Image: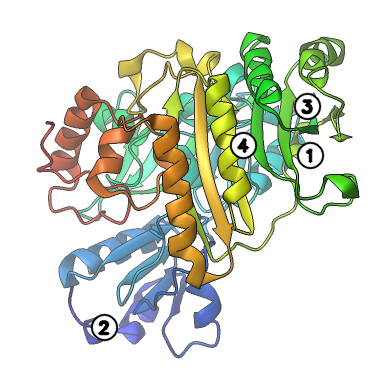
Amino acid sequence: MKAETDISISDLRASLNGEVIGANHPRYDDLRRVFFTAFDRRPAVIVRAADASDVARVVTLARETGAELAVRSGGHSRAGHGTSESGIVLDLSAMNALDIDTDGRAAWAQTGIKAGDYTRATGDRGLATGLGDTASVGLGGITLNGGMGFLVRKHGLTIDDLLAAEVVSADGETLHVDEHAHPDLFWALRGGGGNFGVVTRLRLRLHEIDQVVGGMLVLPASANVITGLIAAADAAPDELSVIANVLKAPPLPFIPREQHGSPVVVAALVYAGAPAAGENAIAPIRALATPLADMVRPIRYPEMYGPESAGPAFDVGTNMLVDNLSSADAETILAHLETATAALAAVQLRVLGGAMACVPDEATAFGHRRARLMVNISARDQRVEKRAEHAAWASDVADALSRGVRTPAYVGFIGDEGEEGVRRAYPASTLKRLAQVKRRYDPDNLFHMNLNIPANMNEA
């Protein structure tokens, strides 16, 4: 990477429509930060792009100068890929336009828009695209990684609703990409992350979803409750999607004081169908134990996206895609939670299947379509000095659950795992094909601040 002085901020300002922020800018310290604040890097310049032409200019600059290029929409990367030390940060957050075609049940959206803003805007028309479960994530990141959210069983992954994209390639060319134009790139974008270009706009299918039965259900945690919840969610109609966190009860006002610090299951549920059918589908989960809090009710779908919150210093952990979770595994999770010292330590369980599993494996770059469950291990804290301790805890949980076997994983929740993470995220045949697409569109690996697939990566 070349020196900072090779990037002329004044020249950039003159050539771009967006905002250019150098180290002397009064907002530099705010704008250089990502969601996980421990990634305290100082880029040479931050460009808040206004349009695709700005993106193309910045990509060209990075290619010509050799400066490291970090691209971000929401900045939620667990590995800190949305920022750079002495490089260029291409911040897409100002590119947040949304054009909704109500009659056509589709929307063109710039990739800097946040999931919550997209969902509220489409929800005003009784429409929705499944976009994860967090309001503050950027559309670009959640989509390119796959997108597992509140509608995963009813309508599949976010990428299953991707109809087209606008992409700035490594040579600075703006491409329209869909199943007919650059079909190899369209395949790779759906699960391959940011390896192949800067996606500036996405055309997404919209579904008619207005009212759902949804909200939070808190149950006391035991091995029987954990395994029973998974079994009930798996057996439920595809209209029901469940994201459950097993953790020590935080001191929240809706959880009885005597339960604070005790293990609980905090489940976010969405039934995208008729209210009476939703109550019937959720009843077996409610019956697992007397709820400590029950906020599940008929609501408008956008209400599932709560208010944005400040990010912690870090989130260490990993995830695995598995077919089942035994009672012994549930006991292992509970035992490890007892030893956790992070401000927020949790094992998240996302019950999969349904529409996600109906798409052929080879149709998109997302691997492991048939996994029944995602287990996401997370330790979050503001105390940077505790990072190594919490990382060791998360690693111990993962080792105990995987029993030393390399498990498949979801690319969106992988941290800094290098090549091992890449091989967990993609089956060998998918990885081989992704490397071929990389050789065509980014042979010099300009776009490497991601779970990286270099063009020369072998498939062994």
- Compared to residue 133, the image places residue 272 above or below, namely above
| Residue 334 in the figure: left or right of residue 329 | right
Q: Are marks 1 and 4 in contact (CB under 8 Å)?
A: no
Residue 297 coordinates in the image, percent (x, y): 87, 27
Is disc 1 in contact with disc 3, using a CB cutoff of under 8 Å? no
Quickly name the residue at label 2: 4
The CA distance from mark 2 to mark 4 is 49 Å
Helix, strand or loop at disc 3? loop
In the current view of this chain or complex, which residue is farthest to the bottom?
24
Say which residue appears at 37% left-offset and 28% top-offset: 366
Q: Earlier in the sequence, mark 2 or mark 1?
A: 2
| Residue underneath mark 1 | 303
Q: Nearer the viewer, residue 159 or 181?
A: 159
Task: State the CA–CA distance, disc 4 to disc 3.
Answer: 37 Å
Q: CA distance from mark 2 to mark 3?
A: 50 Å
Residue 295 left/right relative to 444 = right
Name the residue: 14% across, 40% down. Answer: 440
- Identify which amino acid the numbered label 4 is placed on: Leu
Query: Which is in the foreground here, disc 1 or disc 4?
Result: 4
Disc marking residue 210: 3
User: The residue under label 1 is which amino acid type?
Assistant: Glu
Q: Does the rendering let one see residue 65?
A: yes
Can you give x and y, in whole percent of width and height, for residue 130 in the image? 60, 31
Q: Quadrant of the N terminus?
A: bottom left
Nearest-to-viewer mark from 4 and 3: 4
- For marks 4 and 3, the one nearer the N-term is 3
Point out the tag, 1 or 3, that comes first from the N-terminus: 3
Marks 1 and 3, how far apart in space? 10 Å
The residue where tag 4 is placed is 334
Q: Residue at x 59, y 39 (%)?
A: 335
